């Protein structure tokens, strides 16, 4: 850039502590790659103001639509979303310019007295409003011959952990990435293995979006892209899309790279759908070859579609049907 006093790039962000932390991190990286100042513009989304349960307001897109409107009307230049909150259908007018390197994708437990999930007493009250978490926590408890009571809660991370601090719940389940970005990961009392609890598709990853016509900015933002993360979340979201489920459906998915010695050889995709009571889960996995060019989305997209078809053949649709989306 030869411009000695370039206009600041406007980064639209929700005003929650987590959104501000995520936006601040991306803002710093964008300053480095563009050499331009970045200014944060606070945008309020429906998901922030509504007190209804996410499962009732439908989940899909409630945190992102106001940011996207601001991108489309030019109020802001780019936006940072939690990738798991993004609907799977990408509008043509918006470019998913970068998917930066993912944080820990796992869910964690924050429980009283440092308890792990397996140490929770029978009948423990575990806060989560996520059908995905309910289904898998209940299935895990059943496998242990135990029973937990899942209690639907909402609110930001402070609010959720507050239920445990005040003694109203024995534990809450949160994404590790959110706690890490807020500097509170040491409050986690158990990192839940994806063998037991598959995270939400895209969990732990961020999405950096700008208007599709802004090709120059999109190219600069693309420098923040991590091709491994993009391949993984592409597979996970392809599964979610092919199941025709939204972000509040009881669907878990995680793609990870299987390394053979030094060389990364395969992408593994695991998926789960279940009833919220945990009585029935359909859980399958598949592997695919990592494309020579990781930017080539064909393999991850196909893996997601093929795994979805297998899951549907095993009755996945009937398990998601318990709630309308
Ligand atoms: N649905 C809310 C939401 N969206 C993204 C995160 C955490 C950060 C992430 O997954 O990237 C959270 C909170 C949570 O699930 O604990």
Image (spheres, rainbow, N blue to C red):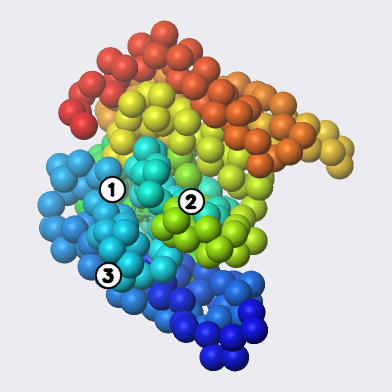
N-term mark: 3 or 2 = 3
Residue linked to disc 2? 96
- Residue at the image point whose x is 33% and y is 26% from the top: 244
Mark 1 surroundings within 10 Å by alpha-carbon count, few (fewer than 14), some (14 through 19), many (20 or more) = many
Residue linked to disc 3? 43
Query: With 189 as the anchor, is 171 left or right in this view?
Result: left
CA separation in Å, label 1 and label 2 = 15 Å
Query: With 172 as the anchor, is 254 left or right in this view?
Result: right
Q: Is mark 1 within 8 Å of ligand 1?
A: no
- Residue at the image point whose x is 52% and y is 58% from the top: 215
Q: Which disc is residue 105 wearing? A: none
Secondary structure of the residue carrying numbered label 2? strand
Q: Nearer the viewer, residue 252 or 124?
A: 252
Q: Is residue 237 visible?
A: yes
CA separation in Å, label 3 and label 2 = 19 Å
- Residue at the image point whose x is 22% and y is 57% from the top: 47
Secondary structure of the residue carrying numbered label 3? loop
N-term mark: 1 or 2 = 1
Residue linked to disc 1? 61
Whole-percent x, y for residue 289 in the image: 72, 26
């Amino acid at each position: 850039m030869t411009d000695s006093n370039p206009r600041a790039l406007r980064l639209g962000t929700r005003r929650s502590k987590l959104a501000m932390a995520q936006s601040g991190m991306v803002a710093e990286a964008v300053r480095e790659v563009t050499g331009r100042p970045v200014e944060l513009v606070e945008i309020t989304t429906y998901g922030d103001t509504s007190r209804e349960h996410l499962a009732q307001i439908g989940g899909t897109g409630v945190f992102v639509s106001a940011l996207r409107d601001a991108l489309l009307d030019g109020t802001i230049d780019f936006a940072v979303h939690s990738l798991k909150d993004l609907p799977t259908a990408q509008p043509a007018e918006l470019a998913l310019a970068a998917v930066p390197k993912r944080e820990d994708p796992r869910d964690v437990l924050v429980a009283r007295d440092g308890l792990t999930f397996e140490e929770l007493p029978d009948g423990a009250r575990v806060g989560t409003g996520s059908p995905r978490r309910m289904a898998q926590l209940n299935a895990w408890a059943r496998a242990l011959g135990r029973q937990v009571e899942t209690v639907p809660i909402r609110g930001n991370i402070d609010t959720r952990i507050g239920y445990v601090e005040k003694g109203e719940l024995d534990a809450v389940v949160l994404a590790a990435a959110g706690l890490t970005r807020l500097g509170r990961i040491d409050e986690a009392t158990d990192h839940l293995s994806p063998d037991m609890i598959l995270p939400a598709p895209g969990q732990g990853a961020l999405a950096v979006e700008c208007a599709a016509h802004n090709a120059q900015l999109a190219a600069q933002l693309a420098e923040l892209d991590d091709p491994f993360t993009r391949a993984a979340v592409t597979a996970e979201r392809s599964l979610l899309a092919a199941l025709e489920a939204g972000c509040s459906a009881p669907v878990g998915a995680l793609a990870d790279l299987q390394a053979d010695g030094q060389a990364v050889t395969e992408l593994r995709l695991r998926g789960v759908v279940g009833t919220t009571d945990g009585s029935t889960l359909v859980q399958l996995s598949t592997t695919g070859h990592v494309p020579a060019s990781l930017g080539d989305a064909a393999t991850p997209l196909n893996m997601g579609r093929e795994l979805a078809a297998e899951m549907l053949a095993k009755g996945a649709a009937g398990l998601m049907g318990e709630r309308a989306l």
